[in-house]
Amino acid sequence: MAKWAIVEASSGGLSDICDEADKFEIYEGADSNMKWVEVPDDTTYSHYMANGTIYDSADDQDSVVEAMLNRTEAYGPVGDQLDMMYRDQVNSTNEWRTHINNVKTNTAKPSTVTQTKSDDPKRIQLQGRKAWDPWVDNWVPPG
């Protein structure tokens, strides 16, 4: 059974993903910014439409940004690190230094990660066209 989603014209964002029987009426005139579009059965709200094709936004995740977020999370909150430093001073231990060394050893440094964000121009919505309009080679915006 086909799935349907309301697609926003400029961002390609999806909303109201449902079965055909659950569709409701929306304005879809020539000047409309929304349209019901048939989408693959596995489409979720993490997908978007560009140039008439559905893409998963997770595929666009930049691995450098992901590495930065992973490393920041591994370091932990500054308050927790300050507590470690305090305990180190009071107890003559190396808890903070050990923690930081483990993060640096076991978590990729963002500058050493290869960027993976898609360079496919078809994934970037053509300016002046609606997200559900198919890709057109050598298209030039009117103006």
Image: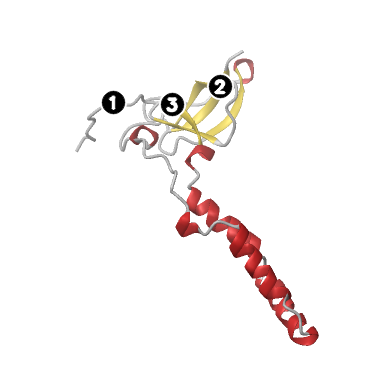
The secondary element bearing badge 2 is classed as: strand
Picture quadrant where residue 100 is located: bottom right
Seen in the picture, residue 13 relative to 64 is either above or below; the reply is above
Amino acid at pointer 2: Trp
Mark 1 or mark 2, which is nearer to you?
1
Q: Residue at x 55, y 56 (%)?
A: 108
User: In the rendered structure, which disc, 1 or 2, sits on the residue that comes first in sequence?
Assistant: 2
Q: Residue at x 36, y 32 (%)?
A: 122
The secondary element bearing badge 1 is classed as: loop
Cα gap from disc 3 to disc 2, whole angstroms:
13 Å
The secondary element bearing badge 3 is classed as: strand
Q: Residue at x 43, y 48 (%)?
A: 115
Q: Which residue matches tag 2?
A: 4
Cα gap from disc 1 to disc 2, whole angstroms:
24 Å
Determine contact: label 1, label 2, CB under 8 Å.
Answer: no
Q: Which residue matches tag 3?
A: 53
Q: Give coordinates of residue 54: x percent, y percent.
A: 48, 28
User: In the rendered structure, which disc, 1 or 3, sits on the residue that comes first in sequence?
Assistant: 3
Which quadrant does the N terminus fall into?
Answer: top right
Amino acid at pointer 1: Val
Determine contact: label 3, label 2, CB under 8 Å.
Answer: no
Q: Residue at x 33, y 32 (%)?
A: 129
Q: Which residue matches tag 1?
A: 136
Whether residue 80 is visible: yes
Q: Give coordinates of residue 83: x percent, y percent.
A: 74, 77
Q: How many marks?
A: 3
Amino acid at pointer 3: Thr
Which quadrant does the C terminus fall into?
Answer: top left
The extreme right residue here reads: 91
Horizontal side of 115 relative to 82 (left or right) equals left
Q: Give coordinates of residue 85: x percent, y percent.
A: 70, 80
